[in-house]
Image (tube, rainbow, N blue to C red):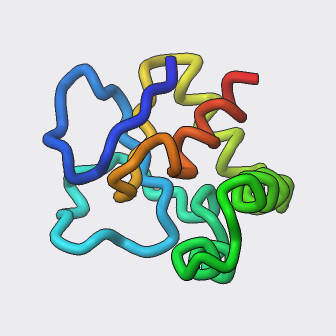
């Protein structure tokens, strides 16, 4: 099973393996709050900056993010998440406040396809 959660929400035992999928480490978060940091599953920085600046809309962001998952380094980390998810619950973590407009929901959907 694959779940999603905001990294700033309190950890729970039911989270299983907690996987941070951000390129940059979030402020104020101790390394002990995550089990894995797979930064290649976060959006590339130019895409993230363009989206935050309003230069890229949500539809374009989604398309480009999914394209970025085809990179070999991202594929290797996707394989790791899939392996963990076969054995136990995996919770994908990101700092975005709105899950509906966050790559963690896009990644979860990609992994469940």
Left or right placement of residue 12 versus residue 57 in this view: left
Query: What residue is shown at x 51% (from left), y 51% (from top)?
Result: 102
Is residue 56 or residue 92 the one in the foreground? 56
Is residue 71 shown to the viewer in this render?
Answer: yes
State which quarter of the image contains the C terminus. Answer: top right
Is residue 84 or residue 56 the one in the foreground? 56
Is residue 74 shown to the viewer in this render?
Answer: no
Query: What residue is shown at x 52% (from left), y 49% (from top)?
Result: 101
Left or right placement of residue 35 versus residue 47 in this view: left
Query: What residue is shown at x 74% (from left), y 53% (from top)?
Result: 59
Asked if residue 98 is positioned above or below residue 57 in the image, the reply reads: above
Locate residue 98, reporting x and y percent.
39, 48
Query: What residue is shown at x 45% (from left), y 58% (from top)?
Result: 37
Locate residue 64, reporting x and y percent.
79, 61
Residue 17 in which image quadrant = top left
Is residue 51 or residue 92 the one in the foreground? 51
Is residue 16 or residue 45 the one in the foreground? 45
Left or right placement of residue 2 versus residue 43 in this view: left
Locate residue 39, reporting x and y percent.
54, 64
Left or right placement of residue 53 versus residue 25 in this view: right
Looking at the image, how many numbered discs can be counted on the residues?
0
Residue 86 in which image quadrant = top right
């Amino acid at each position: 099973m694959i779940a999603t959660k905001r990294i700033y929400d309190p950890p729970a035992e039911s989270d299983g393996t907690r996987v941070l999928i951000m390129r940059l480490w979030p402020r104020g978060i101790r390394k002990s709050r995550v089990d894995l940091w797979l930064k290649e599953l976060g959006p590339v920085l130019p895409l993230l900056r363009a989206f935050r600046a309003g230069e890229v809309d949500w539809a374009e962001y989604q398309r480009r993010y999914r394209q970025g998952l085809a990179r070999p380094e991202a594929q290797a980390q996707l394989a790791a998440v899939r392996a963990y998810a076969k054995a136990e619950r995996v919770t994908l973590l990101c700092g975005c406040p709105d899950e509906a407009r966050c790559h963690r929901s896009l990644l979860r959907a990609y992994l469940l396809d």
